[in-house]
Amino acid sequence: MNEADYRNSDIEYQDEFGLPLAPADFEAAQTLPDHQERSIIARAIEEYHKSTCIRFVPRSNEIDFVFVTRREGCFSMIGRDGGQQLLSLGDGCMFVGIIIHEFMHAVGFWHEQSRADRDNYVTIMWENIQQGQTHNFAKYTDGRLHHLNEAYDYNSIMHYGPYDFTKYRNRPTILPKQRNVMIGQRSGFSQTDVRKINKLYQCGSLHKETCEDTDSQCRGWAELGECKKNPKWMHTNCRRSCNQCPDINGDWSAHSFGRTEPTEDEGKKPSVLTALV
């Protein structure tokens, strides 16, 4: 399956808007990134934690998950496809903005210029597009790509830049119809990107969440092996001690990450320790 097929595949699982939702869990190939690259991935994930209610935690044995690996190029399935689905971060992809972009595909979003109303906002210069790449500039009906009642966003991290897939270095493939706007930024989420994610996942009002332990004895329990013996309770209440936090400073102890779903069985709190070991 090539990059285009991967991005344009039909999605089986959808929400009330008819939009694909993300798989429950994410896992990174241990052979993919080195220590420095893992810290870049962690910084991208932290942007989701700061701005949305989506949370990425280590995958254990879940059936549906996104597998982050190194293939040719940067690409992802759009939304939930079931089972293991690839998200590729190949050469030239290890930048925070690009990783945010690919994960936004995984959580259910198409490119901004694929909207049904895009011709009101941009002009596609078909004659300048590389042979075999015109499919990347297709637009989709509102039934397939729902814009969640948000205006067209030139500043979206999901928008192509003016020279993407151009045959000629000085000839654009996309021209904005509005003057003095830039397209194709990969600095981070736009305000509209954040609103759309939070609408899709029904996040409601958000407060800034820190990844900390909620019990003073977490470190002791972790050293006694409770993170593996009692993961449901420990991974919720002792996130820092159980290495469930993507560390933006590069201290990545876990090898994988994902989004959890609430379950009825939340595990059991370990016995109280009399002293830390």
Image: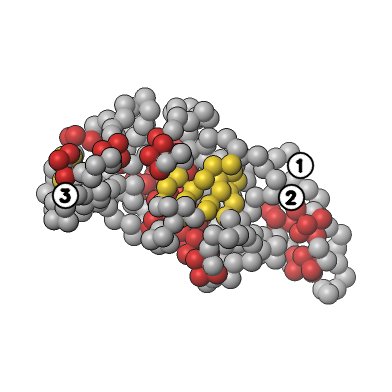
Q: Is residue 16 left or right of residue 168?
A: right
229, 64: nearer the viewer: 64
Q: Is residue 79 left or right of residue 4?
A: right
Q: Residue at x 34, y 47 (%)?
A: 158
- Secondary structure at badge 3 equals loop
| Disc 2: which residue | 232
Estimate the x, y position of residue 207 in percent, counting from the top left.
Answer: 51, 54
Estimate the x, y position of residue 179 in percent, counting from the top left.
Answer: 11, 49
Q: Amino acid at mark 2?
A: Lys
Q: Residue at x 13, y 51 (%)?
A: 171
| Disc 3: which residue | 172
Badge 2 crowding class, 10 Å Cα cut-off, few under 14, some 14 to 19, many 20 or more, is some
- Secondary structure at badge 1 equals loop
| Of callouts 1 and 2, the N-terminal one | 2
| Disc 1: which residue | 265
Q: Is residue 241 left or right of residue 65?
A: right
Mark 2 and mark 1 in contact (Cβ < 8 Å)? yes
Alpha carbon separation for disc pair 1 and 2 = 8 Å
Mark 3 and mark 2 in contact (Cβ < 8 Å)? no
How many labels sit on residues?
Answer: 3
Alpha carbon separation for disc pair 3 and 1 = 54 Å
Estimate the x, y position of residue 6 in percent, counting from the top left.
Answer: 44, 39
